[in-house]
Amino acid sequence: MDDLFSDALRQLLDDQCTPAVVRQIEASGDGAALWAQIDTSGFADALVPEAHGGAGLSLQEVQGVMALCGRYTVPVPVAETMMARSLLAHAGVVGVPHGSITLAQGQRAADGSLACAGVQLGRVADAVLVSDDQHMWLLSTQDAQRTPASFVLDADVHWSAQQVTAGLQLTQHFDMRLLLGCINAAQLSGALLAVFNQTLQYANDRVQFGKPIGKFQAIQHQLSVMAEHSFAAHMAAQLGCASDTVVPDRVRVAVAKARTSEAALEVAALSHSIHGAIGFTHEFDLQLFTRRLHAWRQAGGAESYWHSVLGRELVDHRNGLALDLIRSATDVTA
């Protein structure tokens, strides 16, 4: 994360995306003020080609930015908008759309309506870039029917046939699950490191039986397991974003999302174990992160889905060695 672009976003989020702001947006469903600060700073156009007014960065170059979205539990779709605006530019859409955009996989009904279940940040996004098995649309959420989903800022979104027809239909088609898997792997990596750092600090501050609980061997063992998962997930997320374009490699995303999703379960459980009952409380910041660990673990496919992707890849290349597949997936210079 140590680059000028990420450092600039970190400074902005330090001031504008505090836990108090995250709580306020979760309660109100209104992230317009925070989004305006981020959008005005130009971060949402990082992946847009320079010819279209963006920074022209690659996916690999913005991995740190997406990880920061997890580290600060950013409650507006920054990473999703970055990806969506880039896809729109590459699809030939003239002009960068205003407002925030999230990504979703949809299902078209016989009557022409379109439904998306569990749209990530669908409660606060201005529009959704929706893909079904054959087509893709950019649809506004303003008049869409939105109902609460399992995570507080997610929503089930439904558009009528007339709204779909009035939306912008793209001539290109992208695999939304692949893109969401890449984004959420990066966000998970940032959130995992944040949870580990918070838990380590708590273990050093919390005194029991006359000394910090971090001095006890059982706690040290739990912290070491958390560290292993967190840093392995960080490396896996970097691998998932190892692309010179805006579209990631499917096998690398499979490795990244499977590993970060596995880590999410372990790190969330261990962090709450070390914090005791206090970690679950609404007043404590830890729950802002661990709720997202569980939500992002499922978003874009959990580890079981991406394990099956890797399994199919091995079967399809059964004439080669498994080691060859691992080498090709992890060699980011290839």
Image (cartoon, rainbow, N blue to C red):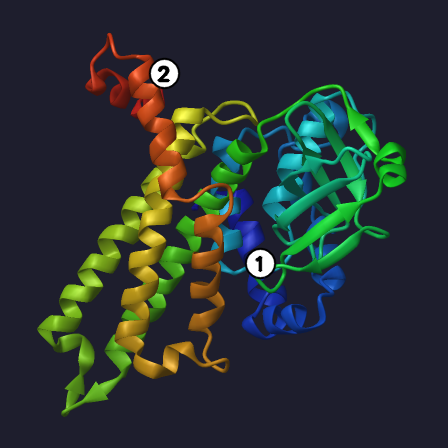
Q: Amino acid at mark 1?
A: Val
Which residue is under mark 1? Answer: 74
**Where's residue 46, x and y in %?**
63, 37
Q: Residue 7 vs residue 325: left or right?
A: right
Q: Position of residue 28 (x, y in %)?
A: 71, 71
- Give how far apart the Cα atoms at labels 1 and 2 are: 33 Å
The quadrant holding residue 42 is top right
Q: Is residue 237 visible?
A: no
Whether residue 266 is visible to the viewer of this picture, yes or no, is yes
Residue that badge 2 annotates: 334
* Front position in the image: 231 or 11: 231
Q: Nearer the viewer, residue 137 or 93?
A: 137
Q: Earlier in the sequence, mark 1 or mark 2?
A: 1
Left/right of residue 228 with respect to residue 300 in the rendered view: left
Nearer to me, 26 or 98: 26
User: How many numbered marks are there?
Assistant: 2
Q: Residue at x 37, y 56 (%)?
A: 192
